[in-house]
Image: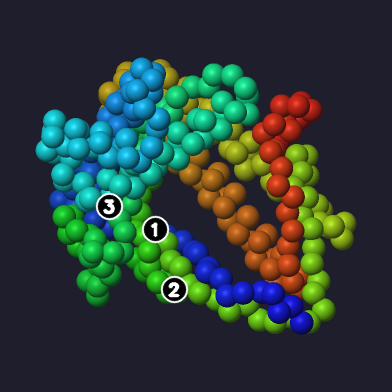
């Protein structure tokens, strides 16, 4: 038996459709705009500070900027305090990727990008301090109100965070849960290695090959059609926004197909009798650049 396996935490995400009324939609949309502006203001101040060589990028630095930003405009107090903290962590992660790119390429890389409204579509609430709660009549979120939610399955574990996300005009609640699991002691371990490939999605150490359909490539014609329409229509017009929503819908369909496929493959592997999995840590992007291949 394997006596070295310790208790561990299992983290899962559950996505449910939200049906906010017009007032709650306005409240959510307003906070998405505030979150995007808040992110950009911290980024603007941090870039100026970094380029002037005044200080290193850190949470302490961000906290100082946040105080300045709120003093300059009290409207950002509409954002829940922990939501503002999550925005800081989101930007800190972007900076970590920025410094990683500099190290990998051994040359100057672009700063984290400012977010347009098309690229900022979610806000996060922690479970602590009563930021949200699930009731019989729906989901209650602090400073937004109660909304109808379609709970089509039961969540397992303790809910840690709620993410409210807007996708192509629809609203979703994504709960992240954590649950302690006790792995059973297993006899006759049957491990398998997984080699993530470039032309073949994955190859197992027992010779099994796993291919993945290129859903994005299959949707390219539809996406390109709506990209052309977006480009032709006037910025800020209603018709351009409609075309942009249709284009994003095509992306969403392709992404959902990929997520569904990966979910089925992982379930298939877990239920296939293997008792442990080993994956080699590789930098696929660098491999693609080095040997001139395109990932599937």
Q: According to the image, label 1 marks what residue?
A: 174
Q: Quadrant of residue 232?
A: top left
Picture coordinates of residue 151, whole percent (x, y): 37, 69
Of 64 and 110, nearer the camera is 64
Q: According to the image, label 3 marks what residue?
A: 82
Q: According to the image, label 2 marks what residue?
A: 157
Quadrant that contains the N terminus: bottom right
Q: Is residue 223 visible?
A: no
Of 53 and 219, nearer the camera is 53
Q: Residue shown at 20%/33% (left/top)?
A: 69
- Is disc 1 placed on a helix, strand or loop? strand
| Label 3 to label 2: alpha-carbon separation | 22 Å
| Label 1 to label 2: alpha-carbon separation | 14 Å
Quadrant that contains the C terminus: top right
Q: Earlier in the sequence, mark 3 or mark 1?
A: 3
- Is disc 3 placed on a helix, strand or loop? helix
- Other residues around mark 3 within 10 Å, as few (<14) / some (14–19) / many (≥20): some
Q: Quadrant of residue 4?
A: bottom right
């Amino acid at each position: 038996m394997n006596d070295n396996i310790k208790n561990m935490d299992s983290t899962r995400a559950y996505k449910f459709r939200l049906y906010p009324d017009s007032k709650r939609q306005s409240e959510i949309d307003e906070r998405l705009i505030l979150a995007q502006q808040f992110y950009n203001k911290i980024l603007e101040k941090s870039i100026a500070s970094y380029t002037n060589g005044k200080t290193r990028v850190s949470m302490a630095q961000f906290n100082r900027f946040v105080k300045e930003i709120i003093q300059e405009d009290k409207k950002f107090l509409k954002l829940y305090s922990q939501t503002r903290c999550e925005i800081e962590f989101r930007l800190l992660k972007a900076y970590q990727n920025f410094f990683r790119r500099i190290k990998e390429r051994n040359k100057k890389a672009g700063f984290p990008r400012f977010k347009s409204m098309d690229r900022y579509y979610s806000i996060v609430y922690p479970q602590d301090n009563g930021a949200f709660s699930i009731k019989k009549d729906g989901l209650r979120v602090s400073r937004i109100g109660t909304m109808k939610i379609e709970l089509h399955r039961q969540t397992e574990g303790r809910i840690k965070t709620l993410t409210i996300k807007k996708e192509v005009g629809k609203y979703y609640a994504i709960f992240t849960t954590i649950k302690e699991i006790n792995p059973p002691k297993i006899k006759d371990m049957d491990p398998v290695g997984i080699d993530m490939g470039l032309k073949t999605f994955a190859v197992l150490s027992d010779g099994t090959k796993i291919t993945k359909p290129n859903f994005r490539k299959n949707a390219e014609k539809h996406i390109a059609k709506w990209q052309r329409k977006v480009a032709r229509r006037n910025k800020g017009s209603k018709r351009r926004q409609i075309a942009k929503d249709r284009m994003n819908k095509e992306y969403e369909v392709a992404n959902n197909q990929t997520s569904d496929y990966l979910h089925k493959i992982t379930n298939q592997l877990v239920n296939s009798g293997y008792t442990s999995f080993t994956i080699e840590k590789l930098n696929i992007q660098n491999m693609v650049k080095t040997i001139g291949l395109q990932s599937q």
